[in-house]
Amino acid sequence: MENIVEKLIDGIFELSKEKIALLTILLLALVLRIMAAINLGVNADDMHFVTDAIGFLSSEKLVTWSMSAGLWHAVTDIFYNLIGFTQLASRSTAVIFGALTVFIVYLLSKEFFNKKVSIISAFLVAIATFHIKNTTASQDVMAMFFSLCAIVLFIQALKNQKSYFYMISGIFIGLAIYTKVYPLLFIPSMLLYALYYHKKLNKSLFSKSNIKRISLFIIVAFIFTIPALTHNYLLYKDKGFLDLQFTRTLGLGKNISAQYYSWDHQFEAKNDWRGLFLGNSTNYGSPTPTLWVALNFVRHGDPINFYLGILGLCLLIFSRKYPKDYLIFFILTIIFILPFLASIILLPKHYLFLELIIIPPAAIAITEIISKLNGLFKFKKDLTLPILALLGLVFLIWLGFPYGDHVYGKSHIAQMIEFKEDNIPINSLIIGDSRIYRGRIHWAFNSRPYLEGITFIEMANSLENLPGQTTPIEVFFFECIPDDCGWGTIRDQPDFNATMEQLTQFFKKEGKLIETLTEPNWDRTYYPIISRNDNIKIINIYKAVLPLKQSLVDLAKSPKNWFLSDIGYKPKEKQFDYYKTHNFLDGLLAKLARFVVILAVCLAFLSIPYTIYLTLKK
């Protein structure tokens, strides 16, 4: 490691124009992703994962019940301890590994194309709108970073036939799988590409030395599946059921786990291969083929890179100027993962891989367009920089379009967290309007005494049953102005809405309005300064001093249960998926799995300087 750091420092102080360009592109990528992390709104998965990560490492959990993975949660838990419970902390992995993906796509392009195409590829990743808008509290950006690292090193291993590269590639694909399970589907694609590569050279993949190297790659990758396998083995042995993904795949213990998972669509989900191509999928409920739906996530989210990428793929198919290696690589990379995901689960974030691997062909298209323009108009200076600058401006404008959340305007959730940290005393009671999605309440007010509005009403009505004396307590109430802040179902619950309106009227009478939080209108384009008047009011914050009991505030400090687990996993013995080991070997296996968790976390952080070293080394 010391040697790598020394070489990294030497590389930085011996910067070529190419390295300066790459570092500038990295800085651009970092700025855009930090802005996205701070400003982007939240979705249901966001509000599940942010709380799952709280206390993950100290709980000694190996995986979460819904993911069969845990690396993102462990790393994010560290960022919580470093930064606090903020939007930026929850999205730090997407910021860091998302920005570093610039370098990895550059290295990937360099394995197939020239320096110019590679640098343009890096630039396109930096401003890729779909990638930027996925700077959320989710595992996919991190998983794709590790996956592409593995793929790049695997290609380099095929070329230099060094066992070290196979081993490092195995580490990265293992980290990807421990971040999110579906990168497992890249392994058969990588092996098929190895077969193609050796066939092209008229060599056998199945020589003794090659089998040893491929085996090393697979064994190293397998190490990082130990936490998930151990968790499920010990959980099944102790309680007779598995986590959600293992239950869906193996079907073991469903009669027991149904009480926990049956509400989740994934519990009974199966691949619908007919719906993939013909539509009317059981997993989507639309006549549109789910393969086309998956492609549309990227086409709508990043139309410029998508269409340039299609043009570039056509050039690779029909032009003799370029070898077919990348075309074969592209097809083999998506041949397993794309149909599998599109046939069973349709979430836009799962298709980041498609945007990233279509970017090098997009860079090919741009270089060809520049070449044609230079030849047609006989410009004295190369048009590359002006065209890339113009393209960058178009991408920045596109970020303000209403596809997904706005990058340029801060969401009300981020503002709620900031207001809590800056303006609410640490022991004051916070009440969240129950029309605010429960996950948002848990995330925004975590680490403080807080209650949902409906719970506060119940406790206030039975205040005499609580111990202690009545005392003046400072209370902050967050009202959902539009009546539905994330649920999507409040209009069908008029009585519930009326109850929350009564609570709001109470705080209007007993307290005072101290702040109104606004955010950009999702249905309109939004840009700083010029769109300020288009903001819509989302949250009113009231402050009141009410005669309550300290015991109520103490109850408000207690851990809240969210998606089956108590936030922070305390006490860990009370969690539904906690298991006991019953013999020495099982205890030893649990310790081994725990060691792999710590190893994976260390390697995840070490991958940051290692990636920079790979890119900037001589």
Image (spheres, grey):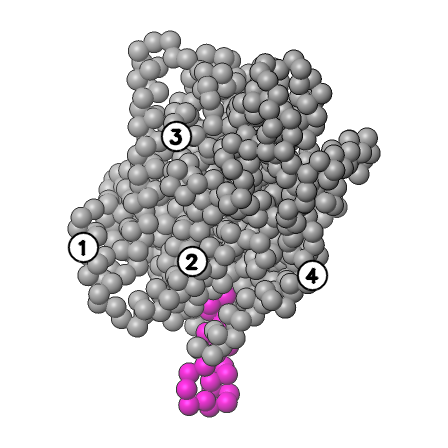
* Amino acid on which the number 3 mark rests in the picture: Leu
Q: Which residue is mark 2?
A: 30
Quarter containing the C terminus: bottom left
Determine the image quadrant of residue 424: top right
Mark nearest the camera among 2 and 4 is 4
Q: Which residue is mark 3?
A: 57
Determine the image quadrant of residue 597: top left
Sequence-wise, the earlier of marks 2 and 3 is: 2
- Residue closest to the eye, 511 or 352: 511
Q: Name the residue: 35% across, 69% down.
A: 21
- Residue closest to the eye, 356 or 17: 17
Residue 286: horizontal and vertical position, in percent? Answer: 74, 44
- Dot 1 and dot 4 residues touching (CB under 8 Å): no
Q: Is residue 150 left or right of residue 283?
A: left
Q: Which residues are magenta?
A: 362-383
Q: Name the residue: 34% across, 36% down.
A: 600
Dot 2 crowding, Cα within 10 Å, few <14, some 14–19, many 20+: many
* Amino acid on which the number 2 mark rests in the picture: Leu
Q: CA distance from mark 2 to mark 4?
A: 28 Å
Q: Which residue is mark 4?
A: 534
**Residue 6 bears which disc, if any?**
1
Residue 249 visible in image: no
Disc 3 secondary structure class = loop
Disc 4 secondary structure class = helix
Mark nearest the camera among 3 and 4 is 4
54, above or below 558, in the image: below
**Residue 124 bears which disc, if any?**
none
400, above or below 441, in the image: below
Q: Name the residue: 58% across, 44% down.
A: 416
